[in-house]
Amino acid sequence: MKLDSAPRSSSGISETENQPEPTDSHDSLLMTAQAVSLEEKPSLEIVSIIEPRTSVVVNSPKKQESAAVVFGTTFITIFLAEIGDKTQLSTLLMSAESHAPWVVFIGSGAALITTSLLGVLLGGWIANRLSPKTVEKSAGVMLLLISLMLFWDVFTSN
């Protein structure tokens, strides 16, 4: 690559004068060259390629998930979280005591739907007012506090 002017050396790194400026956005993405003098010998020059003058930032928003993926993820998460918890055990005991399992099923199902509806409505309200990052950090702090309180309860009860 031939440069328009001879390099000036300063502390082992040379610069060139009168480098042409890019004329449009396509030219600005081209690599620029800089001549480097080796041991102050003007006859020995190498050309080094440096980074592009402009960095390209790609804005890639999160891809919207399909309804089936959201439904499946939600179902599996709630199903696994509810197995063996107090609600399931209470439902099991009420069903055994009342000898009316379908009435207990309808009652517990309605209660779970109602609490889920409250959670969805509250989550939608929060999503319109706070950033996802803030909600995520707040949920993490709340879960940490709950786990510390449970640990403290177990630790002090012995």
Image (cartoon, grey):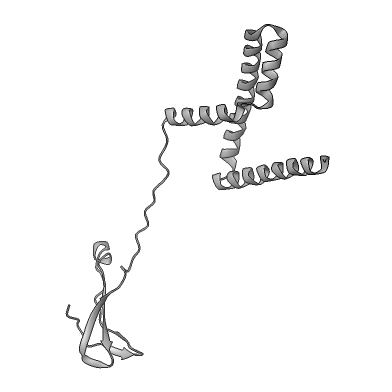
Q: Quadrant of the C terminus?
A: top right
Q: Observer-nearest residue: 43 or 17?
A: 43
Indicate the position of residue 63 as horizontal and vertical percent values: 40, 40
Residue 24 versus residue 114 in the image, above or below: below
* Direction from residue 32 to residue 99 in the image, left or right: right
Residue depicted at x 36% and y 54%: 58
Question: In the depicted view, which residue is nearer to us: 149 or 151?
Answer: 151
Residue 56, position in %: x, y? 34, 59
Most extreme residue toward the left is: 2
Quadrant into which the N terminus falls: bottom left
In which quadrant of the rendered view does residue 156 lie?
Answer: top right
What residue appears at the point 66 percent right and 46 percent down from the top-left corner?
141
154 lies left or right of 119: right
The image shows residue 25 at horizontal and vertical percentages of 27, 62
Q: Residue furthest front?
A: 158
Which residue is pictured at 27% across the width and 64% down the height? 29
Give coordinates of residue 89: x percent, y percent: 68, 21
Residue 118 placement: quadrant: top right
